[in-house]
Amino acid sequence: MRKCIATVSLSGTLSEKLDAIAAARFDAIEVFENDLIHFQGSPEDVRAMAADRGLGIDLYQPFRDLDAATDEQFRRNLDRAERKFDIMDTLGAPMMLVCSNPTPGAVTDDARIAAQFHALADRAARRNLRIAFEALAWGRHVSRYSHAWSIVKAADHPHLGVALDSFHTLSLGDDPAGIAEIPGDKIFFLQLADAPRLAMDVLQWSRHYRCFPGQGQFDLARFLECVLIAGYNGPLSLEIFNDVFREAPGRRTAIDAMQSLLYLESQTRQRLASAALANPQSSAAQALGRVALFDPPQPPRLDGVAFLEFAVDTETETALGGLLESLGFARAGRHRSKEVSLYQQGDINLVLNAEPDSFARTHFSEHGPSICAMSLTTDDSIRALNRATALNCPRFDSRIGPHELKIPAIRAPDGSLVYFVPAELGSDGLYEIDFDLTARPRLKGVDAGLASIDHVAIGLPVDALDTWILFYRAVLGMQPGDSLELSDPYGLIRSCGVASDNRAVRVVLNVSQSRSTQTARAVTSQGGAGVHHIAFACNDIFATLEKLIENGVRFVPISPNYYDDLLARFDLPTSVVARMRRLSILYERSGGEYFHAYSEPFAGRFFFEIVQRTGDYDGYGALNAPARIASQAQRSAAMAHP
Ligand code: MG
Ligand code: MG
């Protein structure tokens, strides 16, 4: 389907916006009036700039407050519309969006509104332009699409139709099912926006918190399904007002925008296809035959984290290797042709890459010691790669030596790598080709009971959270959980867990709302996104912690007050809480239990978390994160002012 985006959705000057939109391969734009009013050139220039970039101008918007109580006022409104038509002629924009009137002066007589729209459509018809009527969620009299449609129907003019905007419908909790009953050729335009569920004034919600489909919590696929069943086959247009996007780099935003539309098309296609399968005569089946919807390979099944790769230099390799050994890892192998070593414990594989002149070394010089790649075990690594590239993720091809294994890889939004390892390769198959594993027998005896990677936590700049949620959702088929706000001594942090359906892969995304939190400082010192901790799961956290402390691993001390509070909050045996206090183990309970402890950071970059889950606990101990952060903050404050 034709893909369009409103210029208001991106940051930058108009020409920067058009560059970003064209680079992300959109077909067309909606010109938002303010972008034109503030542009230091003529409408002819805008038309030429769009044409130079291969972009059509599908819509000019918005025209406000058309309906009027007096004939005199209405005549003035028509004059005002004629001036806009002049501009549209010059721009080559064929359609104007007129939104419902939110002012106290709004006409409340539907017949009068219909007559006035008919008069406007007549004027538009003389210039071969079309009018699309949009119900704003905060419209004074008309706030729902069904109402806008009844007025359009009554006005009965071929140059007048409705504009649908998913935000206005879904923010009111209105049912989109009725859209399917509107004749498709009377739906003139379709705007798509998602949003997080927020309890706030709908106007403010719309102006500041819209996001791309797949980044919020609305059911956009169901909305689009209804629109397609109606018979609409015009452009899919994104109209996003978002404070963060207004600051974020426009190029990235445009890439996300296109990815979100492709993802939405594929989800909608699936809905239509399953309805068509159930009933080949259904309106869903007909819709499927009418429009060609994006159909990428299915998301991969994720079976776990095969390995994590750290970018190090020779010096940090030694230091990190030492820490891993005290965490119970064994140095199990050495790469046959590169300066890369493998550490193993349980099902955990950690790769330390110190190879000069490699991707890892570039990553190291930019970010210091850090995670540069995450490798996921999948049922079909080629399908996973093909889905990712279909959704516009760049693929990555590494330099490989003779007889070495080639693992498909893509770049995550921050440029780090995600490898797709075929499950059938198994852990042995994966490493025995590239690594000399003769050291492996040493594994026995040093093990501290760490069994698998529970989750990886990534710190992000505030404008990157939506990008990453969309990436995990669209590309990897993972689902975000609730987004939580946590307190840091110096501000607020927003934390959102993303997990595969089977919970074999979990990633926690943390962003700082303030510039002075620990998360913010970690992010800026790493110049972008960065893994700030890795959580290892074990089956007996008490035994594991005893062993690790004996090995000299240092854990973040937790205030005794925390444990007094724990006794008050939960009916835990005092002896257990005393043991937790001695070992700095934190606790949370919700459908099951979560025991966890945090190591001191390595080189000020990242740290490790030791976790044990029981029952159906599905979170990440987020409520305890402030206990860790406060402790770390007190430590650094004490170091700064001894
Ligand atoms: Mg709109
Ligand atoms: Mg964690």
Image: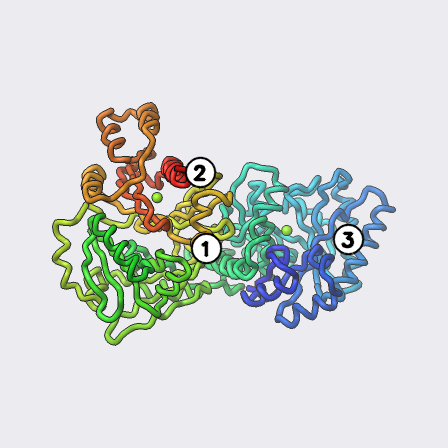
Q: Tell me if residue 461 comes above or below residue 626 in the rendering.
A: below
Which dot, 3 or 1, sits closer to the camera? 1
The answer to whether residue 79 of the structure is visible from this angle is yes
**Secondary element type, mark 2:** strand
Q: In the orientation shown, which residue stands out farthest toward the front?
A: 642
Question: What residue does disc 3 label?
Answer: 118
State which quarter of the image contains the N terminus: bottom right
Q: Which residue is drawn at 51% across and 65% down?
A: 292
Image quadrant, ligand 2 = top left
Q: Which residue is drawn at 60% across and 55% down?
A: 9
Q: Residue at x 45, y 36 (%)?
A: 489
Question: What residue does disc 1 label?
Answer: 528
Question: What residue does disc 2 label?
Answer: 488
User: Which of pointers 3 and 1 lies earlier in the amino acid sequence?
Assistant: 3
**Secondary element type, mark 3:** helix
Q: Tell me if residue 536 comes above or below residue 350 in the rendering.
A: above
The reply, left or right, for residue 120 in relation to residue 143 is right
Q: Please provide percent x and percent y for residue 45.
A: 72, 68
